[in-house]
Image (cartoon, rainbow, N blue to C red):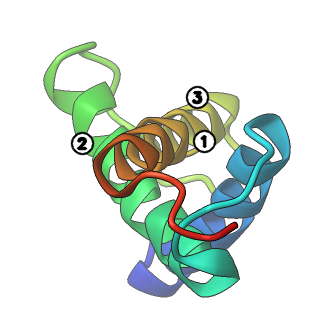
Amino acid sequence: MSFVAWIVLGLVAGALAKLLLPGRDPGGLVVTTLIGVAGSFVGGWISAKFLDRPVTAQFFDLATWGAAIGGALVLLILYRLVFGNSRN
């Protein structure tokens, strides 16, 4: 998959992670989307390195999407734990 495809996948994964984990984020929509992009890379790396399930070259592979959304969820939870709810 190309770098642009990972970015698009990350944007969608970030939006889905936000839907699965509702609430106010300290950074708002822009930071949540960037966390989604980073989460797609982290999820793909974790999947390949520790789960022995490398992501495929196909954009519509279920394991690729699961890894991206899972990575985005993990990073979003960590972000909320570190920075808290600074917006009231």
Q: Quadrant of residue 22?
A: top right
Number of the label disc, if any, that sits on residue 46: none
Find numbered disc 1 in the image and state the secondary structure of the residue it sits on.
helix
Residue 71 pos. (x, y %):
44, 41
The dot on residue 69 is: 1
Q: Position of residue 79 (x, y in %)?
A: 38, 52
Residue type at mark 1 is Ile
Q: Is residue 18 above or below residue 44?
A: below
Which residue is found at the position 58% from the left and 28% from the top? 63
Q: Earlier in the sequence, mark 1 or mark 2?
A: 2
Looking at the rendered structure, the kind of residue marked 3 is: Ala
Label 1 and label 2: CA atoms lie apart by 13 Å
Nearest to viewer (mark 3 / mark 1) = 1
Q: Which residue is mark 3?
A: 63
Marks 1,2: beta carbons within 8 A: no
Give the residue pinned by disc 2.
Answer: 45
Residue 38 point in image, percent of width and height: 37, 64
Judge left or right: residue 67 versus residue 88: left
